[in-house]
């Protein structure tokens, strides 16, 4: 996977390079804005101390630890976080699927992560849910 191969991948990386360094499903999700089926991702129910990095470029995106655990079980079928590492995630209006949503991407490489939803009533400090594809992430235990 790209995050392990190079830290020089970013928004200027040509698509042919992404096709070479990412697996088929990772490319479909990260570069073509795909989605993995609900409940199938390896990080959905994971609870461990560490850092979730971008599955494309390796940039740090989210943390999970006993002090600042931003990962929570939302029951949505994908890994959920209530906040990202400051500056790690960009937001974009997404009008696909017949509705207005907020897409989230890696600030460094532009890889598609998923969507963020707000005001759903979760008991988190931000009342936001970053619904992220496991294939868009790589976990690093600390």
Image (cartoon, rainbow, N blue to C red):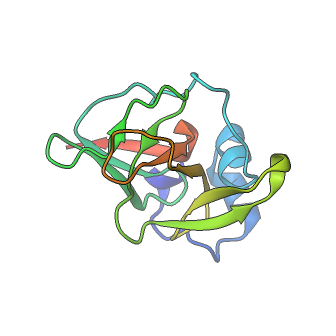
> At x 64% / y 58%, what residue is drawn?
102
Q: Quadrant of residue 73?
A: top left
Residue that lies at the very extreme toward the left in this rendered image? 67
Query: Going by the image, does 66 lie left or right of 69?
Result: left
Q: What percent of the width, then of the height, locates residue 104?
A: 58, 58
Q: What percent of the width, then of the height, locates residue 57?
A: 50, 60
Query: Going by the image, does 101 lie left or right of 104?
Result: right
Q: Nearer the viewer, residue 93 or 63?
A: 93
> At x 33% / y 44%, what residue is drawn?
124
Residue that lies at the very extreme toward the right in this rendered image? 98
Q: What percent of the width, then of the height, locates residue 62?
A: 36, 52
Q: What percent of the width, then of the height, locates residue 33?
A: 72, 51
Query: Going by the image, does 91 lie left or right of 46?
Result: right
Question: Considering only vertical position in the picture, is 13 above or below 117?
Answer: below
> At x 72% / y 40%, what residue is drawn?
24
Q: Nearer the viewer, residue 57 or 64?
A: 64
Q: How many marks?
A: 0
Identify the image quadrant of the C terminus.
Answer: top left
> At x 44% / y 57%, what residue is drawn?
58
């Amino acid at each position: 996977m790209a995050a392990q191969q190079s830290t020089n991948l970013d928004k200027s990386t040509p698509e042919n390079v992404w096709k070479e360094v990412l697996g088929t499903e990772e490319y479909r999700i990260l570069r073509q804005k795909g989605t993995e089926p609900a409940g199938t991702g390896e990080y959905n129910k994971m609870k461990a101390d560490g850092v979730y990095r971008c599955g494309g470029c390796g940039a740090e995106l989210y943390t999970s630890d006993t002090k600042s655990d931003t990962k929570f079980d939302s029951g949505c079928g994908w890994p959920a976080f209530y906040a990202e590492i400051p500056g790690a995630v960009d937001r974009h209006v997404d009008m696909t699927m017949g509705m207005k949503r907020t897409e989230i991407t890696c600030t460094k490489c532009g890889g598609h992560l998923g969507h963020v939803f707000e005001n759903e009533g979760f008991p988190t400090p931000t009342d936001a849910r970053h619904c992220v594809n496991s294939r868009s992430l790589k976990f690093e235990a600390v």
